[in-house]
C-alpha cells in the first residue's frame, strides 16, 4: 500500500468544490431541522439543539477537509476526484449523529419528537452498514473513507448512551458502554506514547455479534415505546456481555492473557469446556427457547385474537390504547412465528421485544412477559440454533457485508 498518493491540482480542486457543496447540505439540514423543531419548541430550546448539532457538523466537515488529500484507493493508489457512494453515506451519518448530539442538550422531547433520537440512531447504523458495502463492491476503499469512518465510529454509541441516561431509561452503567471505545483508544495511545507494546486482538466469533446486538438494543431503547423496568432488564442482558468482552480485549492489548496465568493443561481444559458451552449456547439453547416461546405465547395469542380488547379501558384512559393493543398482538404473532420456525429468528426476537414494549404502555407485565423478554434477548445473542428454516442474518453478523465471503 502506498504511504501517500498525491492527486493532481484539478483533482484536489474538484474535491474542494464537493466539500463546499457538502457544507451547504449540512447547513440546509440544520436549517430544516430548526424550522421543524420550531413547531414544538421555543427559541432557546431549538437554538440549543442547533448550536450543539452545528458544532458536531463542523467537526465532521473539518475531518473531511483534512482527509481530502487521502482520497486514493488503498490497494493500488488510484486517486479519485469524487467522494463516491460510500463516503456520501458516511457524511449522512454525520447528519444523523449531529442531530443526536443536539438532543443531548435539550429537555426530554415529547410527542412525535420523542421518536427522533431513536430514528436517527437507527439510520446511522444502517448507513454504517451500507457505506462499507458500497466501498467494497465499488472497489473504492480509500484512506479518506477510513479516516472519516474512524472519526464517527463509536460516537453513535456514546450519544445514544448519554441520551438513555439523561432520559432515565437506563442507569449509570450504560455510560461505560458509551465510553468503551474511547477508553480502549486512550489506553492504546497511552501505551504507544510510553513505549510499551500494544498487542493485536485475536479473531473473535463474539466481537461483531455483541457489538451489533448492543447497537440494535440502543436504537430500540431510544424509541418511546420502551420504558423502565423492561429497558433495565434488557439492558443488563445486552450490555454486561458486551462489557465483559470489552474488558477481555482491553487486557489483551496490554499483554494480559488468561492463558499466561495458568498452566497449559488447565488452559486446554478450559478451552474444551468453552467449546462445549459454546455449542450448547449456539445450537441447543436457542431451540429450547423457541419451543418455550411457542408454548407460552400460543394460548395467549389465541385468547387475544378471539377476545375483544375492550377491557383496556380499565387500565388506561388513552384513546390510542386500542390501536396499541392491535399493534402489540401483531408483533407478538409475527415474532412468535419467526422465532418458532427459525425464519430470520433474530428478527423475530426483535419483534417480540417491540411487542413487550408496546404492552408495557397499556398493560402490566407479568412473569410470562418478563420470561419472554429474557428469552428474546437470548435469541438475539445466540441466533436460532438447530432446526431453523432460514438464518440469513448469521452471515451478515459474522462477516462484513460486501466481502468476497458473501459470494
Image (cartoon, helix red, strand yellow):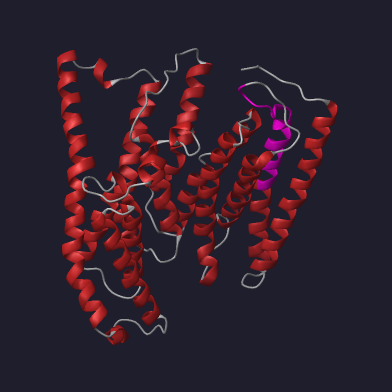
* Range of magenta residues: 57-75
Q: Residue at x 45, y 62 (%)?
A: 223
**Is residue 274 visible in this depiction of the protein?**
yes
Image check: 246 left or right of 195?
left
Q: Position of residue 25 (x, y in %)?
A: 73, 52
Image check: 343 left or right of 45?
left
Measured along the vertical axis of the image, is residue 87 above or below residue 69? below
Between residues 66 and 229, which one lies in front from this camera angle?
Answer: 66
Q: Residue at x 41, y 59 (%)?
A: 168
Q: Is residue 62 magenta?
A: yes
Q: Is residue 264 magenta?
A: no
Between residues 132 and 190, which one lies in front from this camera angle?
Answer: 132
Q: Residue at x 56, y 53 (%)?
A: 100
Q: Position of residue 66 (x, y in %)?
A: 72, 31
**Is residue 229 visible in this depiction of the protein?**
no
Q: Residue at x 52, y 72 (%)?
A: 111
- Quadrant of the rendered structure where residue 336 is? bottom left
Magenta span: helix, strand or loop, mainly? helix
Between residues 323 and 400, which one lies in front from this camera angle?
Answer: 400
Measured along the vertical axis of the image, is residue 2 above or below residue 307? above
Q: Quadrant of the N terminus?
A: top right
Q: Position of residue 295 (x, y in %)?
A: 16, 63
Image check: 305 left or right of 24?
left
Between residues 268 and 398, which one lies in front from this camera angle?
Answer: 398
Amino acid at each position: 500500500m502506498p504511504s501517500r498518493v498525491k492527486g493532481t491540482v484539478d483533482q484536489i480542486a474538484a474535491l474542494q468544490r464537493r466539500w463546499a457543496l457538502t457544507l451547504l447540505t449540512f447547513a440546509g439540514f440544520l436549517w430544516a431541522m430548526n424550522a421543524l423543531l420550531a413547531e414544538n419548541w421555543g427559541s432557546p430550546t431549538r437554538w440549543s439543539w442547533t448550536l450543539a448539532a452545528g458544532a458536531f457538523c463542523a467537526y465532521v466537515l473539518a475531518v473531511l477537509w483534512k482527509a481530502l488529500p487521502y482520497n486514493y484507493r488503498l490497494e493500488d493508489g488510484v486517486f479519485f476526484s469524487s467522494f463516491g457512494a460510500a463516503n456520501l453515506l458516511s457524511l449522512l451519518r454525520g447528519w444523523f449523529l449531529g442531530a443526536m448530539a443536539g438532543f443531548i442538550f435539550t429537555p426530554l422531547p415529547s410527542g412525535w419528537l420523542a421518536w427522533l433520537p431513536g430514528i436517527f440512531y437507527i439510520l446511522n447504523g444502517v448507513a454504517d452498514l451500507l457505506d462499507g458495502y458500497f466501498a467494497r463492491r465499488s472497489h473504492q476503499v480509500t484512506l479518506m473513507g477510513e479516516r472519516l469512518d474512524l472519526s464517527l465510529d463509536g460516537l453513535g454509541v456514546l450519544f445514544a448512551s448519554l441520551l438513555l441516561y439523561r432520559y432515565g431509561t437506563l442507569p449509570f452503567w450504560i455510560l461505560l458502554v458509551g465510553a468503551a471505545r474511547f477508553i480502549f483508544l486512550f489506553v492504546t495511545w497511552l501505551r504507544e506514547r510510553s513505549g510499551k507494546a500494544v498487542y493485536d486482538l485475536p479473531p473473535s466469533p463474539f466481537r461483531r455479534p455483541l457489538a451489533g446486538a448492543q447497537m440494535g438494543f440502543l436504537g430500540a431503547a431510544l424509541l418511546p415505546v420502551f420504558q423502565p423496568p423492561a429497558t433495565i432488564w434488557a439492558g443488563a442482558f445486552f450490555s454486561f456481555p458486551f462489557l465483559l468482552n470489552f474488558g477481555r480485549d482491553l487486557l489483551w492489548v496490554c499483554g494480559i492473557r488468561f492463558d499466561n496465568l495458568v498452566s497449559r493443561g488447565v488452559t486446554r481444559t478450559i478451552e474444551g469446556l468453552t467449546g462445549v458451552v459454546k455449542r450448547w449456547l449456539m445450537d441447543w439453547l436457542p431451540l429450547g427457547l423457541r419451543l418455550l416461546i411457542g408454548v407460552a405465547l400460543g394460548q395467549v395469542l389465541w385468547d387475544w385474537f378471539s377476545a375483544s380488547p375492550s377491557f383496556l379501558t380499565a387500565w388506561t384512559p388513552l384513546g390510542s390504547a386500542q390501536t396499541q393493543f392491535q399493534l402489540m398482538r401483531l408483533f407478538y404473532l409475527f415474532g412468535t412465528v419467526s422465532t418458532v420456525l427459525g425464519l430470520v429468528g433474530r428478527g423475530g426476537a426483535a419483534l417480540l421485544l417491540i411487542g413487550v414494549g408496546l404492552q408495557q404502555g397499556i398493560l402490566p407485565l407479568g412473569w410470562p412477559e418478563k420470561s419472554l423478554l429474557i428469552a428474546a434477548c437470548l435469541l438475539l445473542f445466540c441466533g436460532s440454533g438447530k432446526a431453523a428454516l432460514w438464518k440469513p442474518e448469521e452471515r451478515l453478523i459474522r462477516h462484513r457485508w460486501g466481502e468476497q465471503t458473501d459470494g
